[in-house]
Image (spheres, grey):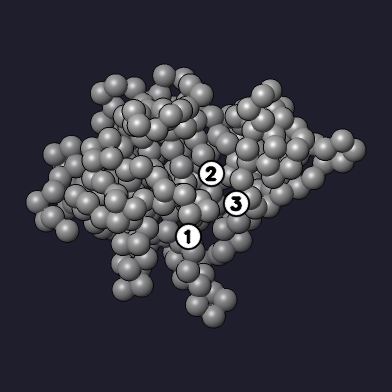
Amino acid sequence: MADDYCLDGYSATELASELRLPRVELLEETRSTLDIAHHLAANGAQSGTLVLAGTQTEGRGRSGSRWLSAAGAGLWITLIERPADSSGLEVLSLRVGIRLARALDLFAPEPIRLKWPNDLYVGGGKLAGILIEARWRQQKLEWVAIGIGINVVAPAEVPGAAGLDPGSRRVEILAELMPGLRQAAVCTGGLTTRELIEFDTRDLARGHRCIEPAQGTVAGITSSGELLVALADTVARFRSGSLVLDPLQ
């Protein structure tokens, strides 16, 4: 760790104060902020501890995919939370996505769109991804690590990637998104009617044909976070997997 590393001129201590968090771990470079967060949590880090890196050499997404995390080009963060109730865990990625979209709307050229289960888009390009990892002890949830990657500047080497408005400052983005992320982590139960309506208004895929996890037409999501796909004679529900839209539609 580089003790003198700053984000937009802010030290780790200054960031913690600005974001009203108990602790910020600020790294110039790391393999993955998720790995650091799990290590800190296993050693007693408080709920609300934020790990932030200038770049990640092995940033990861769902299903083992790699997230390109170029130096200074985005926000590569993991937030540690210790929810007392685990009933909201299965929809946490969607809940985080909704709140993340609200915050990022302020820095984007058009409203943020959501793609089940954990991606955010703007202008047809992928802007951000979410990866939730939980740790348990004897069937009790100990902590969740909420990993988020946001392209502040669209990486030229990634086809179809998107970024935020030119001049968007990372500290200002963090200040907007952090309260919503913390709120999402303590919510219990399934998605509320309001959350389902908001997801629906931002749903990138609804009404479009897909080829994965089944061949059909995307019909939204359920309160428990399942993807609905309309098939020839029924509506199938999928709790896991990836959503791949038909490129020929």
Residue 248 in the image: above or below residue 175? above
Mark 2 crowd level (few <14, some 14–19, many ≥20, 10 Å Cα): many
| Mark 3 element type | helix
Taking the spot 53% from the left edge, 53% from the top edge, the residue there is 63
Q: Is residue 47 left or right of residue 1?
A: right
| Mark 2 element type | loop
The kind of residue tagged 3 is: Val
Disc 2 versus disc 1: distance between alpha carbons? 13 Å
Image disc number at residue 91 = 3
The kind of residue tagged 2 is: Asn
Residue 173 image-quadrant placement: top left
The residue labelled by disc 1 is 133
Residue 72, horizontal then vertical, whole percent: 23, 37
The answer to whether residue 169 is seen in the rendering is: yes
In the rendered image, the residue lying farthest to the top is 109
Which of the two labelled residues, at mark 2 and mark 3, occupies the earlier sequence position? 3
